[in-house]
Amino acid sequence: MAEKQHRSQFAQCWDESGDPVIQPLDTLEALLEWEPGRDAACVSITLLRGAPKRRSAPSTLICHDLSGGYLEDRFVQGVVSPDEECYRFYHWWQVDTFIYFSHRFITIPPSGWLTAAHKHGVKVLGTFITEWEDGAEKMATLLSSEQTITTAVEKMTAIAQYYNFDGWLINIENKIETSKIDLLVKFVEKLTESTRSSLPHGTVIWYDSVTSTGELEWQNALNDRNSLYFDICDGIFLNYTWTDDNLAQSKAFAEARGRPWDVWVGVDVFGRGCRGGGGFNTTEAVEAARARDLSLALFAQGWTYQCLPKEDFTANNNKFWKMLEDCCHTRCLTDLPVCSHFCQGFGKAYFLNGQKMSAKPWFNLGLQSLQLPEGCEEFKGDNLAHKQANVVVASLCTENAFRGGSCLRLDCHMTDARCSKCYNLFQTNIELAESIIVSLSWKSETTDCEVFLEMSMRKGNVQQTFNLVPLSQSREKPTTMESDVVLCHPLSSEQLQVILPVLGKCQPEKDGWKTSYFLFNKPDAKTVIESVGVGIQSIEGGHVAALLGMLQILPLSSCQEDFPAVKQLTFTPCPEVTGGSAKGKSCVKKAWLSWAVTDPRGVDYFNVFGSDQKLCMSDCATALHDWTLLGHSVSCSFCVKSTSGSGFVLHDQIIQSLLVQPVVKTGFLPSLSKCSVIQLPNSVSS
């Protein structure tokens, strides 16, 4: 019976409503028999941003444990009309590693978290955990033979490869027989070697729990009772009830091994036995760890969501991370392309290039864009209160967007000035190796104002500031700009046809949004972009407001390449399953829409559209209104479902055709006329 149950769970990749979900593995049998390919919709295509680097300073990881895990984030195609605001994380530039934690045996990170973290250069680890009597039984079986260990290691490595995450936290919270310690060491050693050799950024971290004699005794330090595990993996995550002496001892042990930053000091944000009591006093424990120059492991940072009023989540979350910014080093952007539309992975509606495609609230971390290093408040209509004149106030606007669910709203009260001081968007350290294109997509909220970008560059030893101004009102330089600032003019429509012919294949802006493009030719000496900011200029002054919808900084060569192409569309109906409430079960029809893509690395995510007509690519240019957005995917697969008795229904009409649109990582959006279409067979659509 148990065998049958675990096979059923293993094969299932959707919940009772028919929506695809990611699931953990709860039994050792499920792990040892795991095979790839049954849940392709759960696989993120987003690779870790940036090249692997050897750490030269303490790092920060967060261990995400929120109400047991696998909440709304388990839905790999996102959630439409969630019951309440869902937890999201956007302070990625202050962390280096993200661990998805639950009290499930093999915790596989959901694709939304993987996608968002990897976009920001943050490694993602799953969790291997055994606890108490059930855990002791699992470990006894796992350590019963070297062959079982080998198989488990092979499967865990294959799981990380398949789902595209970067390694494991090993957390054994049960006693191990002393006679089995050698086999436990072999398991950790083999898993570390396999993970490192098979994954580009492979990492295995040991949690401070079981000792060298097999006792479950948390040491709160790296010492001679747990160093044998530290010596064979990539680091140790200390328990939370440490003292200053524990930290000094850990530092000495790590330095003696030439690994001073491979000790992550556990800090529980809920404060359970942890110095300072957690919450907004978490800084006390963090500062103690940093005083010893040790790495930091923040556990359950979702406290700001779980324990405080949901309506104040953004303000409380920003307050929490602002307190930590002196201790949690903020990484900066170091490579191209840079593209952000400032979406945090949720919205009151969904927009594509300014056009509202859906008016329903939604949550999908996979759609999160590059985030600002310093989170801004949500716009609530009073953001100018008590703010300094001529200084831009930036806030997250969810009432409008260029792409996704939000954009930046820029407000400024101008007195005698015509040009505001800038709001810093990104600190960067990007060396220019070729010509680049810089663009901004923006929209006025008040009359007589324009948005401009300010870029600071260092060429050799010379610092230079460039203001990139659309200049639709005037070709003259605003009088309040500093005299040493270089004014940059946007490319004309004639120049764009020559330099950026790719724009002719893109979906146009809608609803008053405008995009301006600027060209910086390849420098003749070493040149580094050091910061990017945004400001507002106005002729009349007073209160001015505008929206910044997208920022692009791209190598010119990437703008002249063909878009990643979707191909080999297939539509595969699934066996019908029962869904709905206990009182009224309904039949859920599902099918998998799958495809290949010529360059997965060039895709941010995919939009999936449906039509109640039999359409093909040649029809798309004249029938855009015939397509309805069905959803999004961060994989090369999408689940189409219906509770209708006949066919797959869209707004009371049977779906006849499906289309997949890649949202390109550089920010370009191919027009639907350039996207792949599949017509459903009559046997399916009727």
Image (cartoon, rainbow, N blue to C red):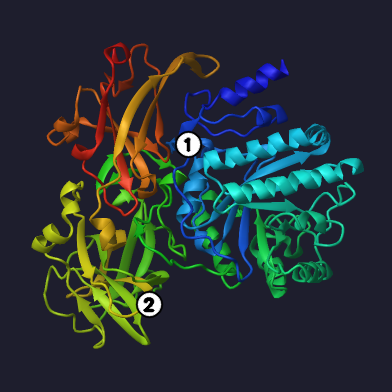
Left/right of residue 634 with respect to residue 618 in the rendered view: right
Rendering coords of residue 550 (x, y %): 30, 58
Q: Is residue 270 above or below residue 516?
A: above
What is the count of numbered marks?
2
Q: Amino acid at mark 2?
A: Gln
Which residue is farthest left? 494
Is disc 1 placed on a helix, strand or loop? Answer: loop
- Looking at the rendered image, the quarter that the N terminus falls into is top right
Which of disc 2 and disc 1 is earlier in sequence? 1
Q: Amino acid at mark 1?
A: Val
Reading the image, the residue beneath label 2 is 388
- Residue at 62% from the left image edge and 65% from the top image edge: 59
Left/right of residue 127 with respect to residue 214 in the rendered view: left
Asked which quadrant contains residue 357, the reply is top left
Q: Nearer the viewer, residue 130 or 395?
A: 130
10 Å neighbourhood of mark 2: few (<14), some, or many (≥20)?
A: few
- Looking at the rendered image, the quarter that the C terminus falls into is top left
- Give the number of the mark in front: 1 or 2: 1
Rendering coords of residue 624 (x, y %): 18, 35
* Disc marking residue 250: none
Rendering coords of residue 41 (x, y %): 46, 33
* Disc marking residue 76: 1
Is residue 110 at least partly visible in the picture?
no
Rendering coords of residue 58 (x, y %): 64, 68
Asked which quadrant contains residue 571, the reply is top left
CA–CA distance between discs 1 and 2? Answer: 43 Å
Asked which quadrant contains residue 244, the reply is bottom right
Is disc 2 placed on a helix, strand or loop? Answer: loop
